Image: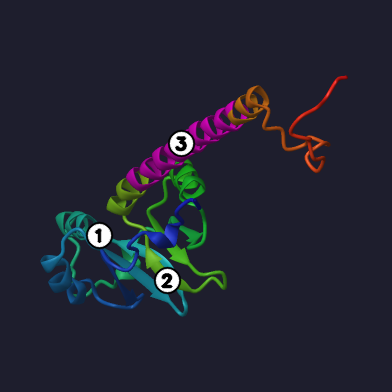
């Protein structure tokens, strides 16, 4: 049973992508509907930053004007990129050691295919734990079945030996007369 990969998670939700010159005010309506979503900021073909509703509130609390400011002025830029075919165990290890502002998922050509959200991280740890539990149970089941099969085979051999049912008997083709006279 293969370990789940990053792309086995639902990575196409909980975010939206905007160009880097988008004004903060233009994304507020979308964030108002989904305040936990991340706004991924794209420059050219690449994701260069992330903005959340918390970032916008902090900016406004400091007196910033969302009508005039573009997202690239307040975005956080520690973006981690992982490939979709990466096993979850490896991805989770890398994520926990680097603590990025956002995690994006790419295909083997480096093309953006999704966003790995904090809730995806929690779901991934549960999914990996379930996978490891299933693998462990499968190994135990295989071991028990193999041991039982070996035991049955050895009992069959012993029973055959006791009953004289030996498949390797070299005299199987010899006819035994019904009566042997010793006179």
Crowding at dot 3, Cα within 10 Å, few <14 / some 14-19 / many 20+, comes out as: few
Crowding at dot 2, Cα within 10 Å, few <14 / some 14-19 / many 20+, comes out as: some
Q: State whether residue 160 is above or below residue 49.
A: above
Relative to 176, 70 lies left or right: left
Q: State whether residue 107 is above or below residue 61.
A: below
Quadrant assignment, res 55? bottom left
Q: Nearer the viewer, residue 95 or 137?
A: 137
Q: Position of residue 157 (x, y in %)?
A: 65, 29
Gap between marks 3 and 1, in whole Å? 47 Å
Query: In the image as oriented, which residue stretches furthest toward the top?
Result: 183
Reading the image, the residue beneath label 3 is 141
Q: State whether residue 172 is above or below residue 6.
A: above
Instruction: Name the N-terminal-most of marks 3 and 2.
Output: 2
Reading the image, the residue beneath label 2 is 113
State whether the magenta stretch is mostly helix, strand or loop.
helix
Task: Report helix, strand or loop for mark 1.
Answer: loop
Task: Report helix, strand or loop for mark 3.
Answer: helix
């Amino acid at each position: 049973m293969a370990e789940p990969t990053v792309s086995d998670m639902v990575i196409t939700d909980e975010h939206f992508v905007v160009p880097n010159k988008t004004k903060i005010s233009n994304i507020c309506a979308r964030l108002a509907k989904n305040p936990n979503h991340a706004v991924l900021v794209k420059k050219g073909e690449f994701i260069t930053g992330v903005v959340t509703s918390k970032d916008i509130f902090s900016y406004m609390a400091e007196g910033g004007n969302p009508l005039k400011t573009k997202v690239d002025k307040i975005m956080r830029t520690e973006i981690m990129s992982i490939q979709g075919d990466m096993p979850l165990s490896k991805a989770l290890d890398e994520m926990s050691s680097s603590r990025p502002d956002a995690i994006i998922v790419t295909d083997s050509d480096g093309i953006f295919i999704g966003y790995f959200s904090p809730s995806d991280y929690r779901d991934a740890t549960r999914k990996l734990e379930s996978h490891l539990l299933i693998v462990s149970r499968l190994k135990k089941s295989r071991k028990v079945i193999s041991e039982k099969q070996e035991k049955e085979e050895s009992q069959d051999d012993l029973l055959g030996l006791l009953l004289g049912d030996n498949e390797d008997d070299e005299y199987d083709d010899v006819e035994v007369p019904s009566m042997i006279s010793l006179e």
